[in-house]
Amino acid sequence: MNIHPLRSLLYDELHSRPFQVIPSPARVTHMALLCNEADRQAQHEHLQQLYALFGCPVEQGDRNCYEYDCGTFRMRLEQHTEFTTFTFVNLDIPEGSGPFDVTGLTPLPEGWIEALPGQVVAAFHVSIEDARQGPEPSLPQVKQAFEEMRLVGSSPQDGDARVWASFQLHSDGFGRLMVINKQMSDSQLGRLTQRLMEIETYRLMALLALPLARTVSPELVKMDARLAELTQQLAGEGEVNERELLADLIEMAASIESWRARSTFRFGATKAYHELVLTRLDALREDEVSGHLTITEFLTRRLTPAVRTCQASSERLEDLSRRVDRVSDMMRTRVELGIQQQNQQLLSSMDRRSRIQLMMQHTVEGLSVVAISYYLIGLLKYLFEALYDAGVPLDKSLAIGISVPVVAFSVWLATRRIHHHFIKLARKDRLRDQ
C-alpha cells in the first residue's frame, strides 16, 4: 500500500495529550507561561536540571507533551501555540497538613521555579481531598483554606465530586482550587482536574485582550468622529482642500492598520479560548451547591461580557477600516472627476487652437497661391522671351497676360486637391480610432 507520510502523525495527534490519572489525596500546581521559540529552548534546558535531580530520563525529541512519573512526584509539560503549561503533582502529603500547606511545587529545589523562562499568566494550586471513606471538609474549613475569600462551588459529574474555587490570587501569589473526591475513580478524577485547570488557564488567556480593547476603544471613538467630519466635508458643497483631506485619510488608515496588526491575533485568540472554556464547562455537568454560584454561572456572568467587549472592539475596528476605504473611494472619485474636467478644458483649448491654426492655414494657403503663381509666371516670362528671341512670332505681353489667370487657377486647384486629400486621411484616422 502507498502510505501517506503523515498517517502516523495523524493517529498520534489524538493521543498527544492524554488525560492524567491522579489518585486522591494529591496536591497539584498548574502554571501557564507565555513564551516564544527561544523561551521554549531555554525551558527544555532548564528542565534537564530537574530530570537529573529526580533521576528521570531526559526527553530529547520534539514533542508537544512530556510526562514523567518519578514516584511520588510527577511532572507534565504541554506546548501550545503561544504558551507552555507545567503541571506538578505531589503525592507525598504529610499527615495532618492543611489543603494548601503542601503544594505541587514543594518537592522542587529552591529557586528552580523562579528561574523558569517565560511570562507567567496562570499559576494556581489544586488541593485534591479524598472523601470516599470519610467526611468531606466543612464549609468553615474550606473558607479558611481560601483565606476567607468569597467562594464559587459546584458538584460536577452529577455530584460525584465537590469543587471550590475563588478565582482570585491569594497571599502566596497563586490561585486556589479544591476538588473533593466523593466517589470518582483515579481516571475520572484526572479528567475532572484537567478540565478545571484548562478552564482557569483558558479563562485567563481569553482575558489578555481586555486591556487592549480598553486601550483601543477611546482611539476608535476619536477616529470615528474625525471620519464623520471628513465625510461631511466631502458631502458639502463648499471648497475642499483635497490635499489636506487626503493626508488625513492616509494618516487615519495607517493608524487603523497599526491597531489591526496589534490586535487581530489577540482578539481572534480570545474568541477561540472563550469557546474552549464554554466547551470545558459543558463537560463538567455541574449541580448547584446551595448558596453558591456554580463555576458556569460565575464565569458566564463575568467572562462573557469581557469577551464581548473584545469582540465589539474587533468588529468596530474592522468596520472603521471599511468606512475609511469607502471615504477614500469617494475621495478618489472626486479627484478623478476633477482631472476629467481639467482634461475636458484642455481638450477644448486645444480645439480652439486647432481652429485658429486652420484659419491661419487657409490664410497662408491664399498667400501661397499668389506667391507660387508669381514665381511660375516669372518662369514663363523667361520662357516666352527665349521663344521670341529664337524667332517664334509671339506677343510676349499678351502671352504673359493670358498665362496669369491660367497659372493662378492651376495652382489654386492643385492646392485644394492636396488639402482635401489630407482632410480625407484625417477622417479615416478618426473613424479607425472610434
Image (spheres, grey):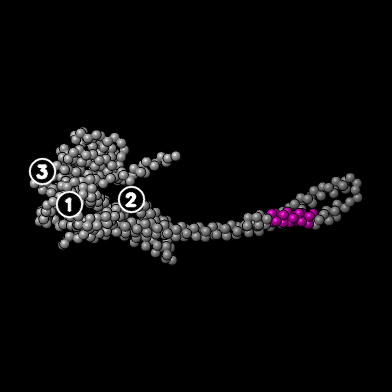
Q: Which residues are magenta?
A: 407-426
- Sequence-first tag of 2 and 3: 3
Q: Look at the image and say whether residue 423 sits in the magenta stretch.
A: yes
Which mark is in front, 2 or 1?
1
Q: Is residue 315 visible?
A: yes
Q: Amino acid at mark 3?
A: Pro
| Residue position for label 2 | 265
Front residue of this view, candidates 44 and 39: 44
How far is mark 2 from mark 3, CA to CA? 46 Å
Residue at 23% across / 39% down in the picture? 68
Q: Is residue 259 magenta?
A: no
Q: Position of residue 128 (x, y in %)?
A: 16, 49
Task: Determine whether, in the image, residue 162 is placed left or right of residue 235.
Answer: left
Residue under label 1, please give it: 181
Question: Badge 3 is on which residue?
Answer: 94
Q: Residue at x 30, y 55 (%)?
A: 275
Dominant SS type (magenta): helix
State the SS at label 2: helix
Q: CA distance from mark 3 to mark 1?
A: 19 Å
Q: Pick whichever, 347 or 363, lies toward us.
A: 347
Distance from disc 2 to disc 1, alpha carbons, whole Å, reads 39 Å
Residue type (three-letter) at the residue carrying disc 2 = Phe
- SS at circle 1: strand
